Each structure stands twice: as structure tokens, then as C-alpha cells.
């Protein structure tokens, strides 16, 4: 089986898609009258799966075929005839690396979106505060001009009466207080602007990091990997690569199908389709019909 990965990069978000090409060699005709006994062969632990879980996946995969015709077609035996291997090499390493990069990219995307939301909220608050500040400055300038005009007038008239003088002193103090408040608002606005710029800088760093991950993932885009293969000469199945438990079960079911003597069919959803595109874990009518023909069932 070959596995062809195709990656599409859209700004920050990275979406992993893939399809695998199954292939086989000249398969022997299976005997449906008695179960094919299988055993574990080479088992590399770098996949991060236990033997127990691997055997469980094999059991699920084999039962897809057995249940379809209500007949036991596979049976585990420590001395079984069919050997199933799990071999770790650069193919699975690439898959695991991409999985880590994708998970990291998803976290970066989430963080970037959170930062963006905080930025937008702060930007909205800043816009409102800036408008209020601008209005206050305009009113202050009007009040200041009015005060200065009065002072100029009374200075030109050799001073103001005591009551007017006291009023002008109070007005001056009010202007000083208003100016102090405006300066505080100006300082606060500048702090908000600095925070907004920090958010933008952090967001851009997150986006850059995410896109670097995407570029690394894209380095393997379009490459074909052998997920697994059934070799009739050694009567063995070797699994080389899988990205999820479901993909593992599908590739096992596919190669077990070959061990039964089944060829590829043209249904993209079939277990025995040449490309591992679908995600279903059910046999299609095409799969079942081919099996019945192979087992000489009506």
C-alpha cells in the first residue's frame, strides 16, 4: 500500500489530508474453508503502540471480513502461518513528525486567534476612549481661550474687580485640573497603543511560527509512502506507516484482504480500493461480493 500525502497551506491554518496507494504482488488463492492463522513477527515499539493494541487492531480488521460472510477467516496463533510485522522507518517518522507539527500549529492558531480577539477588543476600547479624549481636548481649548480672552481684557483695563478676579482664579484652577486629567487620559491612551502593538507583534510571531510548521509539513507533500504490503512469497504482512488508529485498521484490513486472494476494486470507499482515501471501517458491497466469489459462496 502506498500513502500519498497532500498538504494545502492557507495563511495560519494547516489542514492535513492524505491518501494511500495499496499495491500487492501475485497473491495465492485463499482457503476459506479453514481460518488463516496469523502471528506477530517483527514489532518496532517506536510506533508508540503496544502489542496488545496492535493485536486488537488486527482482530478488528480481520472481523470485518469474517462478519461479512458469517465465517471465521482469521485466527491468532503464536505459530500461525501468516506473519504480521510492524516495521518503523523514515515513513512513520515523517508521519509522526508531521502530527506533532500539526498539533503545535493548531495550538499556535488557537493562541493567535485569542490574541487577535484581545487586540480587536482593545482596539474598540481605544477608539471610544480616543474619541472621548479628542472631545475633551476640544472643550478644554474653548475654555482656555475664553479664560485667556477674559484675562487679556481685564489686564487691558488695569485689572479686574475683586469678585471677577476671584472667579478668574477659580477658573484657572479648573483649567489646571482639567489639563491634569487630559494628560492622564493621554498617557493611558499611549499605554493602550503600546499594548495593541504588543498584541500585533505577538500575533505575527505566532503566525510566523505556524507557517514555519506548515512549510516543514509541506516538504513531504506529494510523496508516496508504502503504508503496508502483503508478500505472498513469505506469506507476510508488513505495516510501515499509519497516522490514526482508523488508518491502521484500514491498512490491516486491506492487506488481510490480499492474503485472502482479493484484488483491488474500483469503489473509492472500499477497503480493497487502491488508494487509502476513505475513513469508513465497513466493507462495501464490492468488497463483500469479491470475497464471496473468492470463497465460492452464493
Image: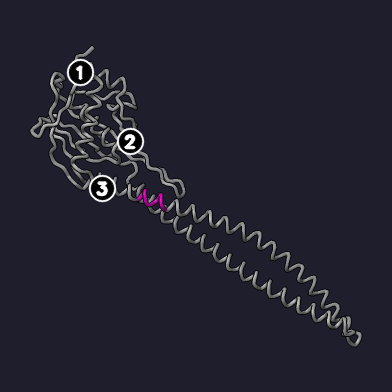
Displayed quadrant of residue 222: top left
Q: CA distance from mark 1 to mark 3?
A: 37 Å
Q: Is residue 208 above or below residue 227?
A: below
Residue 112 lies, in percent from the top left, at 47, 54
Residue bounds of the magenta highlight: 101-107
Q: Is disc 1 placed on a helix, strand or loop?
A: helix
Q: Quadrant of residue 175?
A: bottom right
Percent coordinates x, y for residue 285 in the rendering:
31, 20
Query: Image check: 275 left or right of 119?
Result: left
Q: CA distance from mark 2 to mark 1?
A: 27 Å
| 83 versus 287 height, above or below | below
Residue under numbered circle 2: 19
Give residue 18's mark: none
Instruction: Classify mark 3: helix, strand or loop.
Output: helix
* Quarter location, residue 283: top left
Residue denoted by label 3: 93
Question: Residue at position x 23%, y 17% from top?
Answer: 292
Label 1 sits on residue: 294
The answer to which of 249 and 59 lies nearer the viewer is 59
Give the prevailing secondary structure in the magenta stretch: helix
Amino acid at each position: 500500500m502506498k500513502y500519498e500525502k497532500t498538504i494545502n497551506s492557507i495563511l495560519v491554518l494547516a489542514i492535513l489530508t492524505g491518501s494511500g496507494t495499496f499495491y500487492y504482488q501475485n497473491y495465492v488463492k485463499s482457503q476459506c474453508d479453514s481460518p488463516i492463522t496469523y502471528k506477530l513477527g517483527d514489532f518496532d515499539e517506536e510506533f508508540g503502540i503496544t502489542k496488545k493494541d496492535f493485536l486488537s487492531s488486527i482482530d478488528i480488521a480481520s472481523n470485518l471480513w469474517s462478519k461479512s460472510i458469517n465465517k471465521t477467516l482469521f485466527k491468532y496463533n503464536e505459530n500461525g502461518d501468516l506473519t504480521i510485522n510492524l516495521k518503523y522507518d523514515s515513513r512513520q517518522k515523517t508521519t509522526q513528525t508531521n502530527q506533532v507539527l500539526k498539533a503545535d500549529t493548531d495550538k499556535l492558531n488557537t493562541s493567535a486567534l485569542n490574541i487577535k480577539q484581545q487586540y480587536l477588543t482593545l482596539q474598540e476600547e481605544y477608539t471610544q476612549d480616543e474619541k472621548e479624549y479628542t472631545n475633551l481636548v476640544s472643550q478644554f481649548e474653548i475654555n482656555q481661550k475664553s479664560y485667556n480672552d477674559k484675562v487679556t481684557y481685564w489686564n487691558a483695563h488695569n485689572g479686574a474687580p475683586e469678585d471677577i478676579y476671584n472667579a478668574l482664579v477659580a477658573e484657572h484652577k479648573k483649567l489646571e485640573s482639567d489639563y491634569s486629567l487630559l494628560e492622564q487620559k493621554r498617557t493611558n491612551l499611549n499605554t493602550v497603543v503600546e499594548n495593541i502593538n504588543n498584541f500585533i507583534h505577538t500575533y505575527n510571531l505566532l503566525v510566523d511560527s505556524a507557517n514555519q510548521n506548515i512549510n516543514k509539513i509541506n516538504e513531504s507533500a506529494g510523496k508516496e509512502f508504502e503504508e503496508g504490503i502483503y508478500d505472498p512469497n513469505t506469506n507476510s504482512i508488513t505495516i510501515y506507516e499509519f497516522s490514526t488508529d482508523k488508518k491502521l485498521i484500514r491498512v490491516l484490513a486491506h492487506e488481510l484482504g490480499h492474503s485472502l486472494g482479493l484484488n483491488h476494486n474500483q469503489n473509492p470507499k472500499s477497503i480493497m480500493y487502491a488508494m487509502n482515501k476513505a475513513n469508513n471501517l465497513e466493507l462495501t458491497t464490492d468488497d463483500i461480493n469479491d470475497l464471496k466469489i473468492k470463497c465460492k459462496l452464493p
